[in-house]
Image (cartoon, rainbow, N blue to C red):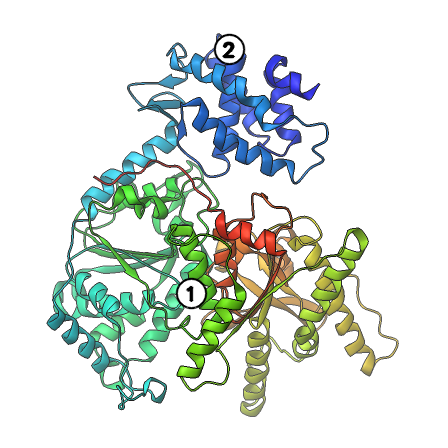
Amino acid sequence: MTKDIITNGSVSQFFDLLREARGIAAINAHLQKFVQDLQPDISADAQKYLLMLLSLQEEGNTRFSLDPEIFYKKWETKWNGLMLSIDAAEMPSASDFKSVVEKGIVDIRQNKYTNIIDWNGTTKLFVVKENFIFATKYYKAKVAIENAATTHFTDGKNFPEADVKKCTQKVATLHKKNPRFTNEENPQGEFRINEEQAQAILRGQKENLIITGGPGTGKTTVVLYILWNLLENNPQYLEDWEIKLAAPSGKAADRMRESIAGGLADINDEFKNSPIFKKLEGLESYTIHRLLKYLPKTGKFYYNSETQFSERTIFVIDEASMIDISLFAALLQAIAAGSRIFILGDPFQLPSVEAGAVLGEILSHQNRSRNFVVKLLKSNRFTDDSNIGQLAHAIQARAEGSETGPVSFLEIQEKVREAARHKNRTEPKDKILLKSLDGMGGLFEEQVQNLVCETLEPFSILPELAEQIIPDASLLNEQQRDEQNSIREKLWNLTLSLRLLSAERRGTCGVENLNKVACKKIRGHWINYCRRFAPDFVPPRSRYFPGQLLILTQNQAMYKLYNGDTGVVIFHEERPYLMLKKDDFVFYPLSLLPEDSLEPAFAITIHKSQGSEYKHVTMFLPKQKGHPLLTNQILYTGITRAKEEVVIIATPEAFDDACCTVTERETGIIMM
């Protein structure tokens, strides 16, 4: 019966079928009705094709082929992935959609639906250009990015070796010496940048750049010294220009500002009274929405192509892989010609939650005609004696296509042990482990519960430490304040020591279930701790408990709290507070924050983990081969959150499938 709905059923029935498969958002029913009202004569096949297009658009694609075979292949991948998450016994197969795709595209190609599809302009809902169809808003964003990039980015070149040496020495003079930098080649313990970093700093004096690199490659360090040299060599920049730091999320914006502050702390004391230091020390960071001044009443930005920022502005934009196509376009259009721009990102991380994969498209093969990208490949964190680093490199190689086939943990570990021996280390600097849970049904659920409880055992003292926190330390004497600061730091550092990550929200290995198990475990430790002092202690009826980790899921701008910010619950005088660390520790009464803006954070999705780092990570991957969340980018992002150990919970088959499955979004951005 469901198969007949595809070819013979009404458009409404077809939409319900996609909804049943969790393949389309409910809001698209309104768009489908709008299309029908605008174009009453549109065929059922064309409408069904457009619904499939909207379904694929929800996965981040913004350009769709009008070649039936190419479109069908993309649909086949999505539909087969959807069938893994539901009872597919009564559902049609992907091949059952072929005729609708073919007939729908034939109808659209006849150019008879001119009320909704524009072939020559951009005034209708959809645009057709060169055998591709776009939602008009995304086509406009694509063109805006291409035009703005032509304005802002030129074809640059590298500097000669002599300049690289001068730059390296200049940075070494600015940066404090440190014994940890000492080796046979560097007995003085100078801070020495590598050639890639020096080229980026030098080119940044004259060029606007996109600077890419994985964790530990020094993107923020490079930007700090680009800014320092710009201010030093151009007095007008120091006196008249503004510097804007921005990122797509509040957490990422805060982290960039903190990283720059950390870099400034390493500047030699003799330079800390300079005007350059003072200017950089006072920088503020913004979300891109806040930078552009989002206007809720109109749904637009104050700064735009007509009302641009002053041309006397230096922009540093971090986590560019997370910026969707519409926001990227809005940002570039608001920046005036003549401004300085430095865009940072890791192209191997997950793309934006919303539509597009702008950074990846800009860096793709078709966009290499101009040289405005500096790639930082050498990681100070993931060196050759790092298991995590070598695993990340192996996953990158499969994303790039330079290597194929399964990734061997044994080969990586042996290679890393050999590198450690050459550095006179008895052990590699970090650990990787692939672990498979082979139980079925209830046994599998029990295995997951036991693993969560075992992994989170170091968190058993979270409630005990949280119970000792006093939010207002102003009434304490100096010794008590020192003790309070020490406890706060110990609690905060513990919260950052480990995290459970999952690709999924639902299911046994989804974050909702993992957090349920974790909260029961840690809450139990709190009750046991309290009963040591009061055997008859009865916990209050509250969704919160001391030591509970919470993450913001919505911006709370009035409190300068943003989606992705994570804190720990403490109680004082029976009132729950959320403790976070910004520049200092801050405490927010939980009664001020909407309950639906918070959720437990012992486990978070891999998407939410972007930009965070933990000593230990245990990462759960989907079990089914072909699952839409079993991808190279998911795997790479998850493992690179770990600094000392990553445990991957997956079957060898699922792990191999993730390594070799690269999510590809089409936006069609081309740099001329």
Q: Element type at marker 1?
A: helix
> At x 75% / y 67%, what residue is drawn?
521
Q: Position of residue 218 (x, y in %)?
A: 33, 68
**Residue 552 sits in quarter:** bottom right
- Mark 1 touches mark 2? (CB < 8 Å): no
> At x 23% / y 63%, what residue is drawn?
200
Query: Residue 255: which numbered mark, if any?
Result: 1
Placement of the N terminus among the 4 image quadrants? top right
> At x 24% / y 70%, what residue is drawn?
225
Query: Residue 126: which numbered mark, if any?
Result: none
Circle 2 residue = 43
Position above or below: 422 against 500:
below
Q: Position of residue 278 (x, y in %)?
A: 26, 74
Horizontal relation, residue 561 to residue 377: left or right: right
Mark 1 to mark 2: distance in Å?
Answer: 51 Å
Q: Tag count in the figure?
A: 2
Q: Element type at marker 2?
A: loop
